Amino acid sequence: MPAPALDDARRALRDCFGYEDFRLGQKSVIEAILAGRDALAVMPTGAGKSLCYQIPSIVLPGVAIVVSPLVSLMGDQVRALVQAGVHAAYLNSTLSPAAQGRVIERARAGEFDIVYVAPERLEDARFVDFASHARIALIAVDEAHCVSQWGQDFRPSYLQIGAFIAKLSARPAVCALTATATERVRDDIVRLLGLSDPYRIVTGFDRPNLHFAVERAEPKRKIARIAAYALEHTEDSGIVYCSTRKDTEAVCDALVSAGVRATRYHAGLPAAERAANQQAFICDDAPVMVATNAFGMGIDKSNVRYVLHHNMPASIEAYYQEAGRAGRDGLPSECLLFWSEKDLSTCRFFIEQESANEELSPEEAEAVRQTRRRMLAAMEGYCMTCGCLREYLLRYFGEEVAAGGPAKCGNCGNCEGGFERIDVTGEARAVMRCVQELRGEWGKGMVADVLRGSKSEKVLSFGLDRANAYGALSHASAAHVKDVIELLVAGRYLDVSEGKFPKVGFGPNFRVAATPEFFLFMKRTARKSGRAGAGG
Ligand code: ADP
Ligand code: ZN
């Protein structure tokens, strides 16, 4: 039998799915699998990952096993395939044991091109027996990032997959797919699934029609900014994401009383009201949707012109997914993120509070918290960076960015906006002297409190009001002092320890005498430098 060629794949694309052309990345992944090579495909949600394994499943002899954690979606996926004339089935706990037995028997008889399974199934004796005697076309691992403790949805059951594949007598090509994989997660996927020299592709993350911008806004000012934005864009449809139900209600009320046709969506509303509001948004009766992150799954409204964030999300992954709901029609659209220090501390609080998942040991739970801390730090970096926001996002997702020279997309707030240079050499020296005096035993908040001469109980009870540094920056706002601390951390003059109570200590470049000059670059549109008055 001749090796199945790309022509067969094209025919399947047309005949089964009704598409003329492959999308970016699909063709090369399919070619790799057809040639028997392992593959790792990182593409955003909606890019068309499923076809990357569905088409080879149809073209190659034997049955494809698709491992997916999304048990609730398997039924839909299989129904769609069956409608397209593909012989597909799924095996999971929603089927009765008898029905599972029938699926396995039919699979044994070679009736299926594709069988979807949950990862737990790979330990089931009956399934293992079937798999070890069947002709397996390929194994696809969907949501492959679940195998990594560095990913956001680690699933211990995914750790079985590697062993399952290794035990097969004839090893087929293995294709791992995910929408979210930092370099660390990608390395874990390759290692833990035992991929051998996989074809790797990261693609489709850039959304050239989206304009990204970040604006720092004190919590009290945010609603006014959002209302002003919506009123400047009354002709447009937009989504405003809030981190809590309470904020969702407050923002929606403010917009409605400002005359914006807004509606709301969060898990606290009755299902009927959620459905009605969603419908009103989709048909543009209420073109502005104010919502928590509960809103958006499976919504495909193409003319969303802006996505505003009232709060900083906990990860770049979450932000990019939500912001990416703008401009699906390819027309210019805006993604504007408002944030404040308060958002950061709220996210931190939730990371530390998160009750341990029962499946995880204390060590594993700490590893998950550590990952979430890193993800939040990356999100914080996005808010603080003075560089191109698009480059920051694409780099985060591991996509190749134009080689050579500093990348500037020319279509983001940072590429366009000017920066104000503020000399903070004096403040920087004061901070370093303070850290030295406190011997690196306190966190950023305490360092700032001491410098600002706070009379808080904690400062007084530890006698820190007697420190030489006490009140040295009494004229500065807490936010400004923290900016200077961040600047010193970024330059490795100071280090922040990891863990629940991070302490500010000395970095490798620490030296109080002979310090260079320090400058903060503040966005012109952002809040004033905050040197006057003691806000915060
Ligand atoms: P992902 O798994 O990456 O989130 P899906 O596989 O669900 O994405 O595909 C998203 C949508 O894109 C689906 O509606 C799918 O039918 C469509 N699609 C996939 N490939 C193509 C293509 N080559 N041409 C047109 N539409 C496609
Ligand atoms: Zn840019």
Image (cartoon, helix red, strand yellow):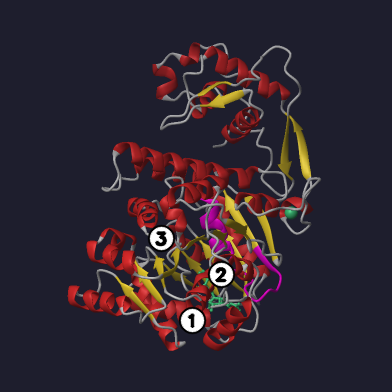
Q: Position of residue 327 (x, y in %)?
A: 64, 71
Label 1 with label 3: CB-CB less than 8 Å: no
* Image quarter for ligand 1: bottom right
**Amino acid on which disc 2 is placed:** Leu
User: Spatial distance from mark 1 to mark 3, Cα to Cα?
Assistant: 19 Å
* Magenta region: 315-334
Which residue matches tag 1? 280
Q: Which mark is residue 34?
A: 2
Identify which amino acid the numbered label 1 is placed on: Ala
What is the secondary structure assignment of the residue under circle 3? helix
For the residue marked with disc 3, what is the amino acid? Arg
Which residue is outermost to the right? 405
In the image, is the residue at mark 2 within 8 Å of ligand 1 by its beta carbon? no
Q: Is residue 269 visible?
A: no
- Report the label total: 3
Label number found at residue 245: 3
